[in-house]
Amino acid sequence: MPWKEFNLVDLRFQFVLDSFQIGVNFTELCAQYGISTKCGYKWKERFIKEGKEGLFDKKKTPKNSPAKIAEETILEIIKIKNHRKFWGAKKILDTYKKTFPNRKAPNRSTIERILKKAGLQDTKRKRRTANSGQRISMPEKATRPNHVWTVDFKGWWYTPDREKVNPLTVRDDISKYILSIKTLKKGDIASVKAEFISLFSIHGLPDVIRSDNGPPFSSMQSLWGLTKLSI
């Protein structure tokens, strides 16, 4: 039976009384009252320690609430922030500790809540690097054979003999002619480079080789997305 708001304390009291009966199955009793055994033990222990008063809900107040911080501390934190507008909670906390070594300093999360409540919390900006989001690309459309080649690894798998297969596919973009489908033992730069050298000797050099953003063709961590192979 679910506990209703209007008689919540009375139901808790009745539950505790029932739990003291000889031979009662505590787990089944909790199920009858629609609560967990953990919740049941909580109300029983509260009743033993505090009596019926312990069956009332207690206020849930954060341990480090800004409301509990002394007003002078809040003012000092805001003062530091106003003097150093680009500082975050960590630097403000360090400065506060150095300035007031004999005071109990609030923790970092409390300072963040104070700044947020005062409208002084900075929105973190995503750090951009010199090559962030930049990669050499040639989105031109192929107009003739050997104009644009496309290259890709189709993904590896194991054969029934437990042999790893990792096919490299190179194709002429306009004719869709498959220049190479070759299983490489390794998908590293040396293996791929050797296959391309062989293809160049047979078909000549294309104007553009288009690949995906994965290794060994490109790297999002390097300048312009270049790898040793692409260079």
Image: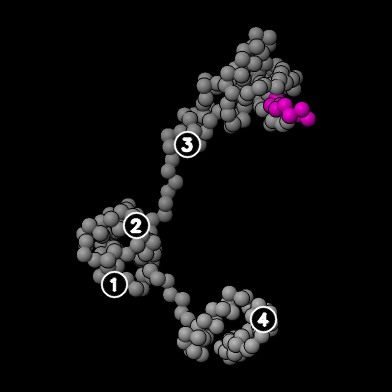
Instruction: Residue under label 2, please give it.
Output: 89
Image location (x, y in percent) of residue 101: 21, 61
Q: Amino acid at mark 2?
A: Ala
Q: Which of the two labelled residues, at mark 4 and mark 1, occupies the earlier sequence position?
A: 4
Q: Which residue is mark 4?
A: 25
Give the image's coloring scheme.
one colour
Task: Give the SS element for disc 3.
Answer: loop
Check contact, mark 2 vs mark 4: CB within 8 A.
no
Residue 137 rendering spot, x and y as whole percentages: 56, 28
Q: Secondary structure at mark 4?
A: loop
What's under tag 1, amino acid-wise? Answer: Ala
Q: How many numbered discs sit on the rendered protein? A: 4
Is residue 163 a member of the stretch shown in magenta?
yes
Residue 76 picture quarter? bottom left
The segment highlighted magenta reads 159-167
The residue sitting at the top extreme is 201
5 or 209, which lies in front? 5
Real-space CA distance between mark 3 and mark 4, rounded to the nearest whole angstrom? 64 Å
Residue bearing mark 1 = 70
**Cα distance, mark 4 to mark 1?**
50 Å
- Residue at point 36%, 60% (across, down): 108
Residue type beneath disc 4: Asn
Q: Residues within 10 Å of mark 2 (few under 14, many from 20)?
A: many
Q: Nearer the viewer, residue 130 or 199?
A: 199
Label 2 and label 3: CA atoms lie apart by 27 Å
Based on the picture, tell me whether residue 209 belongs to the magenta stretch: no
Q: Earlier in the sequence, mark 2 or mark 3?
A: 2
Our reading of the magenta stretch's main secondary structure is: loop
Residue 8: x %, y % from top left: 58, 87
